[in-house]
Image (cartoon, rainbow, N blue to C red):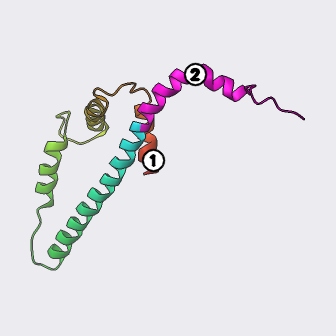
Amino acid sequence: MVENKDAKDAVEAAIDKVKPLIAKVSFGGVMGFCSGYAMKKVGKAVAVTIGLGFFGLQSAAYLGYIDVNWNKIVSDAVKPLDATGDGKVDAEDVKVYWKKLKSLLVNGLPNAGGFSVGFLYGVKQG
């Protein structure tokens, strides 16, 4: 069987048809993936730091070295994180922070289409 090297197969023809779309979506998607991946890695480091701090405080409190007013800590922690001002940190606050973060990350980014999907995939894989 002789194969014509110049002939395009069906996949190559389809790629040629959507080339401009792939270029636009892929750049935003790749930037989103990298941002999401990095965000998850940083988030893990922050979680370890907070967890170790909690472990240290609870251990010292358990051993009687200090008294911890957890109600005050919770109250003081919720205030700056409560973006909607309803007195609690919930999904609506997360949406506000996502919109702010996305606005920052796609500002001036050419062809930012696909950024959100890439970001979610990066967080999942990170």
Quadrant of residue 60 in the image? bottom left
Q: Within 10 angstroms of label 2, few (less than 14), some, or many (20 or more) residues?
A: few
Tell me the residue at 55%/23% (across/down).
19
Q: Is residue 93 left or right of residue 18?
A: left
- 82 or 13: which is nearer to us? 13
Quadrant of residue 41 in the image? bottom left
Identity, as a three-letter code, of the amino acid under mark 1: Lys
Q: Are marks 1 and 2 in contact (CB under 8 Å)?
A: no
Q: State the residue position of label 1.
A: 124
- 40 or 112: which is nearer to us? 112
Residue 2 position within the rendered picture, expressed as x and y whole percent measured from the top left: 87, 33
Q: Which mark is residue 18?
A: 2
Is residue 29 depicted above or below 124 in this figure? above
Q: Within 10 angstroms of label 1, few (less than 14), some, or many (20 or more) residues?
A: few
Q: Secondary structure at mark 1?
A: helix
Residue 69 position within the rendered picture, expressed as x and y whole percent measured from the top left: 11, 62
Which of the marked residues, 1 or 2, is nearer the chain's N terminus?
2
Residue 57 position within the rendered picture, expressed as x and y whole percent measured from the top left: 17, 69
Identity, as a three-letter code, of the amino acid under mark 2: Val
Range drawn in magenta = 1-30
- 31 or 69: which is nearer to us? 31
Quadrant in the picture for the N terminus: top right
Residue 42 position within the rendered picture, expressed as x and y whole percent measured from the top left: 30, 53
Tell me the residue at 10%/55% (across/down).
72
Instruction: Give the spatial CA distance, label 1 vs label 2.
Output: 27 Å
Is residue 125 depicted above or below 63 in this figure? above
Q: Which mark is residue 113?
A: none
Quadrant of residue 106 in the image? top left
